[in-house]
Image (tube, rainbow, N blue to C red):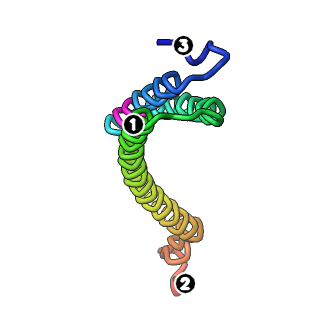
Amino acid sequence: MSNQKTDSVPTPEGVLVSYETLLAQSTRMLACVRQKDWEALVDEQSRYVLEVDRLSRIERDLSFNVEEQERKAALLERILEQDLEVRRCLMARRDELDQLLGTSRRRQDLHRTYQSHSAQVVDGRARFHRDPLHKGTP
């Protein structure tokens, strides 16, 4: 098996190996999202995007026989299924973060509202304090 990353002439087998690499990366991304390891997910996605870009360049002028096309289609199907699950998990995470941000905004609004009202409170005790020496004044 040739190393597609170092060979100058791409082969269908090398491209299929690259698709297997993408599948492995997709599997790791799915594991990251399930474990809520967002930093590792971002790192893995960066490598994944680079591999997709590289693969699209080397695959352009290649022809695949029927068996290779079927293998490629099966790999792509698994990659896309995992990608869909990653996206679903990310959407759920986005919704969770939206809720947290909404709660935080409401708390800030309440804090600002009550803080501005508390700054307007006037101490009226001196106005209503009765001095026993001054009869008739409140």
Which numbered disc flags the more N-terminal residue, 3 or 2? 3
Q: Residue at x 38, y 52 (%)?
A: 88
Q: Is residue 87 covered in magenta?
A: no
Of the numbered discs 3 and 1, the one sitting upstream in the chain is 3
* Residue 106 sits above or below residue 5 on the image: below
Q: Which residues are magenta?
A: 26-31
Q: Main secondary structure of the magenta part?
A: helix
Identified by mark 2, the residue type is: Thr
Expressed as whole percent of the image width and height from the top left, the position of residue 60 reads 64, 36
> Does any portion of residue 117 appear in the rendered image?
yes
| Residue that mark 2 sits on | 137
Which residue is drawn at the image coordinates 50% and 71% (left, top)? 125
SS at badge 1: helix
Q: CA distance from mark 2 to mark 1?
A: 92 Å
Residue carrying label 1: 75
Where in the figure is residue 47, as x and y percent of width and height? 55, 28
Residue at the disc numbered 3:
3
Q: Disc 3 or disc 2, which is closer to the eye?
A: 3
Task: Report if the CB atoms under discs 3 and 2 are less than 8 Å apart.
Answer: no
